[in-house]
Amino acid sequence: MNGTSEGPASAADLDRSAVTESDQNLAPRTARERPAAYRSVFTAAPLAMAVVDGEGLVVSANDTLGALLGTDPDALTGCAAADLVDLASDAGIWHAYREVLRGRQPRLRCTRRLKRADGHSLWAQVTVEPLADAGDTPGLLLSVADVSARRELQERLRHLQMHDPVTRLPNRALFFERLTAALEAETYEHGGTGRIGVCYLDLDGFKAVNDTHGHRVGDRLLAAVAERLTRCAEEAAGTRAGGAPLVARLGGDEFALLVEDSTGTEQVADLAETVLAALQPPFELSDRRLSVTASVGVVERHTAGTTPTALMQAADTTLYWAKADGRARWTLFDPERNATRMTRQALAATLRPAIERGEFALEYQPLVGMEDGRVRGVEALIRWNHPQFGVLAPNRFIALAEEDGSIVPLGRWILRTACHQARRWQLAHPDEPPIFVSVNVAVRQVWDSDLVADVARTLEETGLAPHLLQLELTESAVMGSAGRPLQVLKALSDMGVRIAIDDFGTGYSNLAYLSRLPVSVLKLDGAFVRGFQYDAAPDAGAANPADEVIVEAMVQLAHRLGLTVTAECVETSDQATRLRRIGCDTGQGWLYSRPVAPDRISALLGSAGPGGAGVQAAGKP
């Protein structure tokens, strides 16, 4: 025996041998059967698919893909997959597809509009992802699902969401979507004029139609207006290179026409003219014949640097101007007018805080006796030391204060400050006759506050005698006063306070009513005094005698009623001479002094002598 066993093999050896042989016999069969099984599933699958190699070319396509694209699937072999499913026309999708090909991105899924061989189109969801078990050869699986029905449903729903049910026009949401897209840099940097225009219109008096005829008739009128606006847009499309303006209903009776790639202001203004002309003929609505006009705000500008919000704010502002200017017209956006409006809004927003911060100050303009030139009183004139806009005269903010009611606290401050100052002058010049202070009062102060109580409290607090306070109200506010205003004026007059009518001769001039008012002073409007502006020299030209006749008549009437007369806007010595000859009691104007700080008034009080020479020297411009 040489140590080698040649006997029968053990059971374990036989088992191992059997297993090894079984595996060796089974493996080749599985490898041979697997591609056939995969191909059978691939070919019969209801999902359209194609195998794509690493270069992006179709290796094989199943019958479903061929049917979807309307061609023989074998004809797709070797074609670029990106061309079959339109992946290259969109830069973002093309980049993502290339990343999947290179193995840098795991999957691409997108929706594309595909064109079949027979010319019909369909919407498809395209998916590209690595092919599992691809072996050493890289490959991708392209799958395509027809989503046309779902897409059509989405588009129908979107149309309902983006269109007005009454007029069938695009609604506010779609209008702003188009506007936003038109203002994107990519839109205007690649061709076009780089300009945009909007006609923003509102029907005049539409609420009356709804209230009189009902909302059903109102809706029919809106639909008829929409039809005419659409025709205007279609006609405009025939006269310009771009497409038709977008017509939208923004809500209520407001419409807008969006002009993309406008050629300038003239084009958009012409469109507004066309719209107004189109709305002029009456609307025949069954048994009703209705007429309607519109106000149109026109804005046209460069798209660069413009936002949808800024553009529509400008359009809304301009529409408001068109309404304010008389309606049934179009108005072009004016940057200067808008700047004034913005300044006005800024002032209105800061009025009340400015009172609390002490940003206001008073200046005083002398009222001088015409006979002796002595200062008889002063008018308190408010100034706003605005931190942004500088020193503002009252004509810049008093109307705003009356609108928002801040005139009441502001008026109290003016009254208290002026009375305190008048009392200080009186104490500082005990040898001089005390001068009165004149304070302007707004009608809203009479209605919205207890003016009588405010005056009484101020006089008591300052120690100023009632006859040294004069309250000025405009002629339009005083004439025809009844009820509370008249009661207030009588109570103040009974208290001893002087009541003056400011700007007399330019308002109602109800002379019969004048005798029944508790008024002690008439202040002639400066328009009459300006008519006296000529020199006495023979070659200076002839004056209008009517001015002097009117002023003389008013002075005589006032004196007959026991009233004194103050002439405003006295600027020349010749005016002063003629007013003195007519019988005017006091004068106010630049001849004597501009409005000045309180210390300048003290100087005038100390320097004014007989004839008023001191006053003129101190204050003449």
Image (cartoon, rainbow, N blue to C red):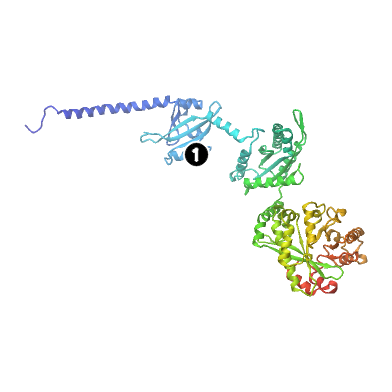
**SS category of the residue bearing label 1:** helix
Residue 399 picture location, percent across and down = 73, 55
Residue 4 picture location, percent across and down = 10, 32
Taking 1 as reference, is 424 left or right?
right
Residue 91 picture location, percent across and down = 52, 40
Query: Which one is in front, 318 or 110?
Result: 318
Crowding at dot 1, Cα within 10 Å, few <14 / some 14-19 / many 20+, comes out as some
Query: Which one is in front, 508 or 436?
Result: 436
Residue 104 picture location, percent across and down = 43, 41
- Position of the C terminus, as image quadrant, is bottom right
| Location of residue 281 (image quadrant) | top right
- Residue 590 vertical position relative to residue 237 in the rendered view, above or below: below
Q: Residue furthest left?
A: 1
The amino acid pointed to by label 1 is Trp
- Residue 119 vertical position relative to residue 334 in the rendered view, above or below: above
Q: Which residue is mark 1?
A: 94
- Position of the N terminus, as image quadrant, is top left
Answer yes or no: is residue 100 visible: yes
